[in-house]
Image (cartoon, rainbow, N blue to C red):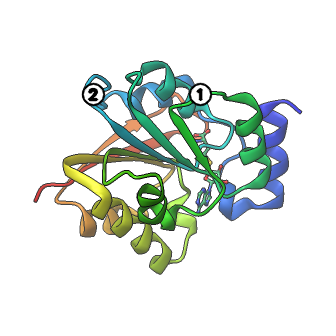
Amino acid sequence: MTTQKSFIKNFWQEKKMVGAMSPSSKFLAQKMLKNVDFKKAKVIVELGPGTGVFTKKILQKMAPDAKLLVFELNTDFYNLLNAEIQDKRMILIHDSAEKITEYLHKNDLLNADYVISSLPLANFPAKLQETILKESYSILKNAGKYIQFQYSLLSKKHLEKQFQTVHISFTPINFPPAFVYTCVKEK
Ligand SMILES: C[S@@+](CC[C@H](N)C(=O)[O-])C[C@H]1O[C@@H](n2cnc3c(N)ncnc32)[C@H](O)[C@@H]1O
C-alpha cells in the first residue's frame, strides 16, 4: 500500500487519532525542523510520525551519535515505519505519547533536546493534551524546544499554559495549511 493510501485508510478508520487525510508536505517538514540545531542535539523525541515524513528528514540531519525516540500509536503506521526504516539511532515505540518519561528511562536516557510533535492535539480531551505537554516539558533540557504543527489555534491556550515562550508561524503550502508552534522551556 502506498503511504498516501495508508493515510486515507487510517484517516477514515481513526479520524480523531490520525487527524489528517494525507502526509505533511516537504515545506511543512522544513518549517518544523528549521529551528532544530542538529549539530548539538543528542536526543530528539518525535510524537506521531505517521508515514515518516519528518522522521526520515530528522534521521538525514541528525548526528551519528544522537538518538531519536519515535512514538506511534497506530499499528499500520508503526508496522510501515518498522519495515521501512533501519537505523540504529532510531528507537521506534508502539505506544502512546503520554509515556515519554517511561521510555526515555527504559532506554537509559535522561532528557531530550527537542520534542517534534504532529499529534492532532486539538482532537484530544483537554486532560490528555495537558498530560502530553507536561510530560514533554518535564523531559526537555533547559532551553529545549517543543515544536508542534496544528491546523488551528485551538490548542494555543494549552501550549501557552505549559511553556514560557510560544512562537507561532503559518505555512500556507500544505494541505490543509498549518500553524507551527515553537515552544521553549525556560527555567
Ligand atoms: C496528523 S498525523 C501526522 C503524521 C505525520 N507526522 C505527518 O505530518 O505527515 C498524526 C499522527 O499521530 C499519531 N498519534 C495519534 N495519537 C497518538 C498518541 N497518543 N501517541 C502516539 N501517536 C499518536 C497518529 O496515529 C498519526 O500517525
Structural distance between the alpha carbons of marks 1 and 2: 20 Å
Is 154 in front, or is 92? 92
Residue occupied by mark 2: 37
Can you give x and y, in whole percent of width and height, for residue 56 in the image?
57, 26
Is 95 in front, or is 110? 110
Can you give x and y, in whole percent of width and height, for residue 17 in the image?
67, 61
Mark 1: secondary structure? loop
Quadrant in which residue 95 is drawn: bottom right
Q: Quadrant of the C terminus?
A: bottom left
**Residue at mark 1: C-beta within 8 A of ligand 1:** no
Residue occupied by mark 1: 87
Mark 2 residue type:
Asp
Mark 1 residue type:
Asp
Residue at image position (49%, 75%) is: 128
Q: Is residue 18 left or right of residue 160?
A: right
Q: Report the number of discs.
A: 2
Residue at image position (32%, 25%) is: 38
Is 43 in front, or is 117? 43
Seen from this angle, which residue lies furthest left?
Answer: 187
Residue at image position (31%, 58%) is: 139
Is 59 in front, or is 109? 109
Seen from this angle, which residue lies furthest right?
Answer: 1
Can you give x and y, in whole percent of width and height, for residue 127 in the image?
46, 80
